[in-house]
Amino acid sequence: MKTLKTSLPLLNAMVVFESAARNGGLTTAAEELNIAQSAVSRHVANLERQLSVTLFTRKGNRVFLTDAGSTLAEAIRDGLGTIREAVERLQAPDRDTFVVGSSFDIAQMWLMPRFDLVASRIPNGQVMLLTSNDYKDFDQPDVALSIRFGTPEEWPGLVARKLFDGEWFPVCSPAFLERHPLASEFPQAFLDIPLLHLITQPGAVDSWQSWIGTERPLDGPRFTSYLSMMHETIAGRGAALAWAGFIEEHLRLGQLVRLTSTSRRHHSSFYIVTRTKTSPAIQAVVQALIGSVADQTLQG
């Protein structure tokens, strides 16, 4: 019978790999962890050998996640996040904890830039972020609020306040557009340029196949993480479909440009979800987050 010790890679190897994946380089990971770069390379090589997969492709001094690498990095981030949350709870049992739930991608792309808004409304407590792709995890009584994608009917007995529509459109970096000029309002034109894909369900409406209007398989790297896909888009390695609400700061800074003036909308939207009875602190956080969306709209 396999035990955790025999069936899982060593924890230190996974920590090293996660740092290299997040930083996009072995040298940066070594600096962050205060270890030699050779040790980082050894840990990654051992992990690839143990799993019998290639986790990175290497170009110069940078490394890029393969599909297998993206899957493992996302799982490790979720796992380490759960461990970190448990340790923080054990170390600070006397402080009130304000738990906010969301998926990892929503947390990184939308919530973390607003984390100070949440923390400032909870001056005497500890804010904790719970990341999960299973919204049932957010139904726990200690979760104050959660950010979810769907429709209010999916969460009976809870209160859902809309943040923004499920709207998406094609984007790329300015440098990529210079290399691949196209008639952007014509969907079939996207067949002629490198595309980056988020792994979705077959027939999903928010896929490149849906945008272009084709059923044929499309080439291009696949990502399980929206965040990883957007990093590659900003780096100029392809065009991607971006969700409105997550991408405005990158557009404002000129890191990305829209490729069409039109958008498409999902039948689902992004919501803040709470219980029916909420404390003044929860109400203050909800209003601050909703207000940040309104402020962003006015700035745009």
Image (cartoon, rainbow, N blue to C red):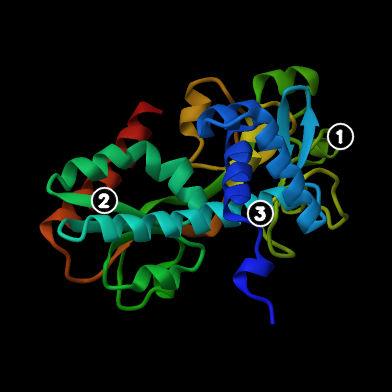
The first of marks 1 and 2 along the sequence is 2
In the image, residue 93 sits, relative to residue 125, either above or below, namely below
In the image, residue 180 sits, relative to residue 142, either above or below, namely above
- Residue located 66% across and 29% down the image: 37
The CA distance from mark 2 to mark 3 is 27 Å
The first of marks 2 and 3 along the sequence is 3
Closest to the observer, 166 or 102: 102
- Residue located 17% across and 65% down the image: 278
What x and y, as percent, mark residue 229? 65, 41
Q: Quadrant of the C terminus?
A: top left
Q: Quadrant of the N terminus?
A: bottom right
Task: State whether residue 51 appears in this view.
Answer: yes
The first of marks 1 and 3 along the sequence is 3
Q: Residues within 10 Å of mark 3 (few under 14, many from 20)?
A: some
In the image, residue 195 sits, relative to residue 181, either above or below, namely below
Q: Which residue is mark 2?
A: 127
- Residue located 30% across and 72% down the image: 158
Q: Nearer the viewer, mark 1 or mark 3?
A: 3
What x and y, as percent, mark residue 107? 44, 48
Q: Are marks 1 and 3 in contact (CB under 8 Å)?
A: no
Q: Which residue is mark 3?
A: 72
Closest to the observer, 91 or 271: 91
In the structure shown, which secondary structural element does the residue marked by tag 2 occupy?
strand
- Based on the displayed image, in which of its 4 quarters is residue 270 positioned? bottom left
Q: Nearer the viewer, mark 1 or mark 2?
A: 2
Q: Residue furthest bottom?
A: 1
Closest to the observer, 98 or 135: 98
- Based on the displayed image, in which of its 4 quarters is residue 233 positioned? top right
- Is residue 110 left or right of 209 when viewed as pictured? left
- Based on the displayed image, in which of its 4 quarters is residue 194 positioned? top right
Q: Are marks 2 and 3 in contact (CB under 8 Å)?
A: no
Task: State whether residue 245 appears in this view.
Answer: no
